[in-house]
Amino acid sequence: MYDTVNFWIDMANISGDNPFEILPYLSEIKEQQDEKSGYSCTGKAGDYLIYIAENGISLIGSLAKYHLGNNIDTLTLHSSKQAIERISDHLHTNIKKAKVTRLDVSTVIPTKRPPAEYYNYLGNKPYFERLQATKDTLYYNNHMRKVVFYDKTKETKNINISMPEIFENNNLFRYELRYTKRITKQLKQVVTGETLTDKVFYRNIIDNWYNEFKSIQKIKNHKIMIDDITSLKAAKETLFAYLLQEKGQSIIDEFLSELKTSKQFNNRSDYTKLKSDLNKMIVSKNGNKNELMQELEKKIFTYAKYAL
């Protein structure tokens, strides 16, 4: 379930101590000379953009696309081993020793409905900022990693990529967990190309992928519980909670964003308190779990359980 994997190969791990020895194996080579950083080159190796400097080599791209020809399919443990060996042979450099600087764990999930219809039932996530960037893309961000949901079918059409026959005419819900910074601190180990092919590491990273989704609050189908209304205040709060849940999590995010932009409150903690109060209302104890959420939870659990 690997997709984007960026690598850094330090000078100490390059055979011959000369990073520029890989130039004959690259295409689209461009040279650069800078007074501060010195001589450097960029080139391509399949899907990878390669940057070469005197202190090492950087690889930026999708390991899945490099090996499989597309990133609709993602890498299993077995195909990850093949991909690492293939790019090592391509560059005549041992990628197993390369340090991973970005890691995306992802897959596409065929769903009954278009992905955008699921987003309103994905609520708040602790320690993450929820942002629906477009109708078809939903982000949960913190400063070290991202959880991203988007419509893979629409993306492939927009950038004119051919769809594998097995996925044609399907709604494809893409779920990605992106480790973008300080991977060693987050995963409590140095992650290298060789680490990616370790069975225990792979199992743990899939569990992380599942648990990140699990920690997102799921919004239920709400119904007004008349029996619980014993005062005018309770009646108003019940109706407000019902209308809030009908609109979905995005209405809270948009409202808070407008308040912050206009600097309505002097105390920043007021925004946090308001967000907490509204999120308590939108995650109702009453009502039934939404059918779309039942479907998505079941499928993500199954993908995580059998991903090897």
Image (spheres, rainbow, N blue to C red):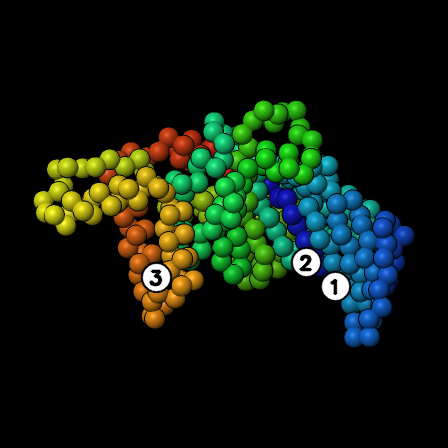
**Which amino acid, by three-letter code, is at mark 1?**
Asp
Direction from residue 209 to residue 100 in the image, left or right:
right
Q: Is residue 180 visible?
A: yes
Can you give x and y, in whole percent of width and height, for residue 224 in the image?
21, 37
Instruction: Quote the CA–CA distance across marks 3 and 1.
Output: 43 Å
At horizontal 85% and vertical 68% (from top left) the residue drawn is: 33
The residue indicated by pointer 2 is 99
Instruction: Quote the CA–CA distance across marks 1 and 2.
Output: 8 Å
Can you give x and y, in whole percent of width and height, for residue 50 in the image?
78, 55
Direction from residue 31 to residue 209 in the image, left or right:
left
Q: Which mark is residue 272?
A: 3
Q: Is residue 269 visible?
A: no
State the residue in front, 255 or 248.
Answer: 255
Helix, strand or loop status at disc 2: strand
Q: Residue furthest front?
A: 262
Crowd class of label 2 (few under 14; some 14 to 19; many from 20; radius 10 Å): many
**Which amino acid, by three-letter code, is at mark 3?**
Thr
Instruction: Quote the CA–CA distance across marks 2 and 3.
Output: 37 Å
State the residue in front, 47 or 21.
Answer: 47
Query: If you read the primary sequence from the N terminus, does the residue marked by circle 1 or circle 2 appear first?
Result: 1
Residues at discs 1 and 2 in contact (Cβ within 8 Å): yes
The vertical placement of 97 against 79, above or below, is: below
Query: If you read the primary sequence from the N terminus, does the residue marked by circle 2 or circle 3 appear first?
Result: 2
Q: Residue furthest left?
A: 230
The residue indicated by pointer 1 is 10
Residues at discs 2 and 3 in contact (Cβ within 8 Å): no
**Which amino acid, by three-letter code, is at mark 2?**
Lys
Helix, strand or loop status at disc 3: helix
Direction from residue 64 to residue 91 in the image, left or right:
right
Can you give x and y, in whole percent of width and height, for residue 277 in the image?
28, 55
At horizontal 51% and vertical 48% (from top left) the residue drawn is: 133
Query: If you read the primary sequence from the N terminus, does the residue marked by circle 3 or circle 1 appear first?
Result: 1
